[in-house]
Amino acid sequence: MNFLITGGTGLIGSALCRRLLADKHHIVILSRRPEQVIPPVLAVQQLQHISKELVFDVVINLAGEAIADKRWSESQKQLISSSRFNISQGLIDYLKGTEEKPKLLISGSAIGYYGLGIDDSDVDEEAAGDNSFSSQLCQQWESIALQAEALGIRCCLLRTGIVLAKDGGALAKLLPVFKMGLGGRIGSGKQWMPWIHLDDLVGIILHCIEKPTLRGAINGTAPAPVSNEVFVRALATALKRPCILPVPALLIKLLMGQMGEELLLSGKKVMPKKALQSAYKFQYESLDAALLNIISSG
């Protein structure tokens, strides 16, 4: 099949491209740095540079400014938002102009959609958002992508959890601290951390492609979310290190402000209801198995 991918050089996009190339698919990546894209993948800086004769079967939109790399100043929040909204709207405008439409658009989103709080009840794709920045960001991002439905294109909204991988993501920031034996829970430790192994997130993307009945929001999380306290203890155990230095909530708020409050001190028990109901088989259902795989291969 022919794929058009934005964000194809990021953590998720790179893993997805490797899998698609192994299966002999053809890939075009929209990239600000096309010289960094390695053949046989084709790269374009602008959608207008794509040949009109090229017909895509699937479009996958993963692009966007990293949400957790910098404190959320007003200008940073604007950058986070515009990077997602502008690329997504650009894709929709491009698709409006194509004669032959793709069968599917998979557009990135996040479990931040479900908003703030610590909710011990299962949260599935039907749950509502709130007025927090992360929730409003996801709601607007998704609403742009859903314009594809009016073009006759099936649309899946991938609400990604905390992605566990050896080459980046959350673990890249946590591992150095925990390897030194300086790890501990964050705040109360009761906030949920819906995680997913990178291989399973790629698997769910492929599952969306293979299952034409899937549409709308799809939670990209493993079926066994854990609290922050359980997560950090599992990580420390996997590394054979102590886990005795908690980080007070007040310190997170002082150092990280709104970003820390929304991304680190809050978390709901998000479940992959649609993935499970559509018979996706997880490679890593337990956190211990996922951490063992990543740490032993790193």
Image (cartoon, rainbow, N blue to C red):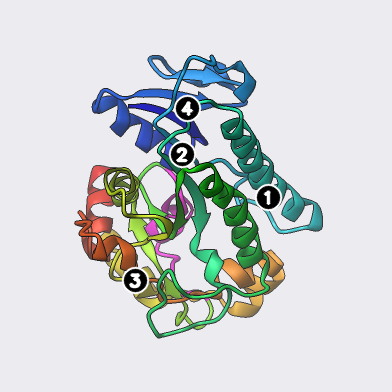
- The residue at 71%/71% (across/down) is 254
User: Which of labels 4 and 1 is toward the front?
Assistant: 4
Crowding at mark 2 (Cα within 10 Å: few <14, some 14-19, many 20+): many
Name the image quarter holding residue 213. Answer: bottom left
Say whether disc 4 or disc 2 marks the residue closer to the N-terminus: 2
Magenta residues, start to end: 168-186
Q: Which residue is mark 2?
A: 60
Please, what secondary structure does the residue beneath circle 2 have?
A: strand
Please, what secondary structure does the residue beneath circle 4 have?
A: loop
Q: Are marks 4 and 3 in contact (CB under 8 Å)?
A: no
Q: Which mark is residue 100?
A: 4
User: Which of labels 1 and 2 is toward the front?
Assistant: 2
Is residue 131 at all visible to an observer of this figure?
yes
Q: Are marks 4 and 1 in contact (CB under 8 Å)?
A: no
Please, what secondary structure does the residue beneath circle 3 have?
A: loop
Give the CA distance from mark 1 to mark 2. 19 Å
Q: Is residue 16 above or below residue 48?
A: below
The outermost residue toward the right is: 74
Name the image quarter holding residue 83. Answer: top right
User: Which of labels 4 and 2 is toward the front?
Assistant: 4
Say whether disc 4 or disc 1 marks the residue closer to the N-terminus: 1
- Check residue 173 for magenta coloring: yes
Q: Which residue is mark 1?
A: 80
**Would residue 98 be found to the left or right of residue 59 on screen?**
right
- Check residue 11 for magenta coloring: no
Is residue 68 at all visible to an observer of this figure?
no
Q: Are marks 4 and 2 in contact (CB under 8 Å)?
A: no
Q: Which residue is mark 3?
A: 225
Crowding at mark 3 (Cα within 10 Å: few <14, some 14-19, many 20+): many
Which amino acid type is marked by label 2? Ile
How far across and down, in percent of the image, does residue 192 sit? 43, 75
Q: Are marks 1 and 2 in contact (CB under 8 Å)?
A: no
